[in-house]
Image: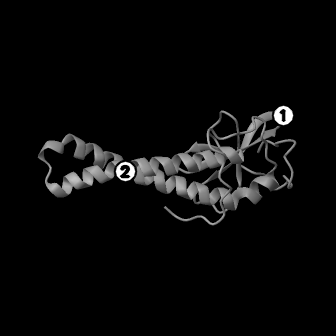
Amino acid sequence: MSATPNRASQPPAGKPKKSKDVQFDLATARKMLPLVRGIVADIVDTHTRLGVLVPESEKLERDRRGLDWAARQRRYTMTDEIASAEKALGAAVAELVTLGVGLADADAGQVDFPTRINSRPAAFSWKHGEDALTHWRYAGEEHRRSIPADWQAGTPIRYRAEP
C-alpha cells in the first residue's frame, strides 16, 4: 500500500460522521481531488491485494490437513494479512465518508462528489487513473457525462442536452 502524504486527519473513534447534506461545487471537488486521489489509490491497491489473498487463504484452509510446514505457516500469517488489509480498507473508506465523498465502485476506484444539478441529486464523478475531474452523473444513474466547458467554478445551474 502506498504512503499518501496528503491525508485528512483521523476521524474520532467510532462510526465516521458524515453530513447528510454535503454538496460540492465543481471548484471545491477539483481542489479536493489530490487528497481523494491518494485515498482511492490506497483503496484500489488494498482491494486488489484482498482479491489475491482471500482465494489463496481459502485454498490453504481447504487443504489444511495435508499442508507441509511452510504452507501451514503461510496459512497462519494470511489471517493476519487479511485482517490488516480489511482494516486499512475500512479506514480508507471511512476517510472518504468523513470528507463527504462516496465510493461508487471499489474495483474501478470510482468516487462521487455529491452535488445538485437542475435541482436533482447528482455527483461529480472521478475514476482512479483519470487526470482530472471531468464527468458528472445524476444520482441513481451509471452513465457518466462530460462536464460541459461552460460550467464555471460554481455548481452548474442548468445542463444543456447535447444535440
Dot 1 crowding, Cα within 10 Å, few <14, some 14–19, many 20+ = few
Q: Is residue 72 left or right of residue 110?
A: left
- Relative image position of residue 1 (x, y in whole percent): 48, 61
**Mark identifier at residue 56:** none
- Hey, what amino acid is under mark 2? Asp
- Relative image position of residue 13 (x, y in whole percent): 62, 44
Give the residue drawn at x 81%, y 39%.
117
Query: For this rendering, which residue is in front, 153 or 32?
Result: 32
Q: Label 1 belongs to which residue?
A: 119
The reply to whether residue 129 is visible in this rendering is yes
**Mark identifier at residue 80:** 2
Quadrant in which the C terminus is drawn: top right
Give the residue drawn at x 67%, y 59%.
35
Give the residue drawn at x 31%, y 46%.
55
Q: Secondary structure at mark 2?
A: helix
Q: Is residue 25 left or right of residue 142?
A: right
Q: Secondary structure at mark 1?
A: loop
Q: Is residue 44 left or right of residue 18?
A: left
The reply to whether residue 106 is visible in this rendering is no
- Relative image position of residue 97 (x, y in whole percent): 66, 43
